[in-house]
Amino acid sequence: MKNLVLSLILTAAITHAQNTPPPTPPVPPTPAPAPAEPAPAEPAPPAVPPPTPATPATPPATGKVEKPKPLSPGDQKFAKRTSEVVLFQLALATRAKSAVKEDKELSDWGAKKAKELTEKWTPFATICGKYGFSDIPVEITKKESADIAKLSKSKDEKFRQDYLELFMKESKSALRDMENAPKMVQNAELKAWAEGFVGILKANAPEIETKYKEEKKRK
């Protein structure tokens, strides 16, 4: 009986051993990664050449914006008178386009003068705005408006003469008032503009007078 029990135990052990899968072999260790090769050094950027002597170095920003110095009382007075002159002459030049009787020659001449005056007005207004001066007239006076309105009463054949006479008187008056003004103006930008504008007045005044005298002779 004892031998039978031992035989059964031995048989069961052999059978279990046959049915049990062999143990999984251990996983070999992962080799350490090879050390990375150092990246090639980037070439140094080319040296920036120093500024040429003709180009002054820009001063460092301070964050403070300097406010332009306002126009002096004398410059303001000049600016007001200038505005009056330009506006009246511009109104006169424009009036040539609407003569009582169509006059292409006079209309073209007036258009040329109007363009010239408009081109001078724009930088003048810019300068005044830059220095915070806005107290300038933007319309002609009532008297000037009335003087221009009188031209509507001129007869067709006399319109050109009356028109040129009014323009001539205005140009002479403006030149008398402003001829020496640039010498008194303090603001550099306004002074430069004034010199150019007075140059236009000096050219226009005798031109208009000549046209007036020629027209008067024809009559």
Image (cartoon, grey):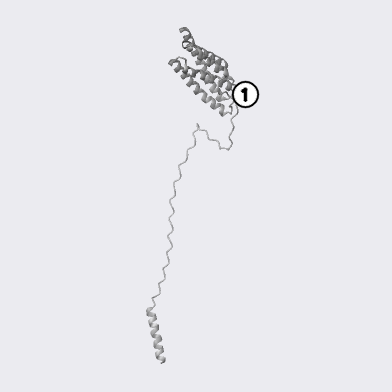
Residue 52 placement (x, y as % from top left): 49, 33
| Residue drawn at 57 percent across, 19 percent down | 142
Foreground residue among 64 and 54: 64
Foreground residue among 183 and 131: 131
User: Given the image, on which type of amino acid does mark 1 rest?
Assistant: Pro
Foreground residue among 126 and 47: 126
Which corner quadrant of the image does residue 29 belong to? bottom left
Where is mark 1, residue-wise? Answer: 73
Establish if 8 lies above or below 20: below
Q: Residues within 10 Å of mark 1 (few under 14, many from 20)?
A: few
Establish if 213 lies above or below 58: above
Which corner quadrant of the image does residue 60 belong to? top right
Residue 152 placement (x, y as % from top left): 50, 15
Foreground residue among 108 and 194: 108
Residue 89 placement (x, y as % from top left): 52, 18
Numbered marks: total: 1
Quadrant showing the N terminus: bottom left
| Residue drawn at 58 percent across, 22 percent down | 80
Residue 50 placement (x, y as % from top left): 49, 37
Q: Label 1's element?
A: helix
| Residue drawn at 42 percent across, 91 percent down | 2
Q: Residue furthest bottom?
A: 1
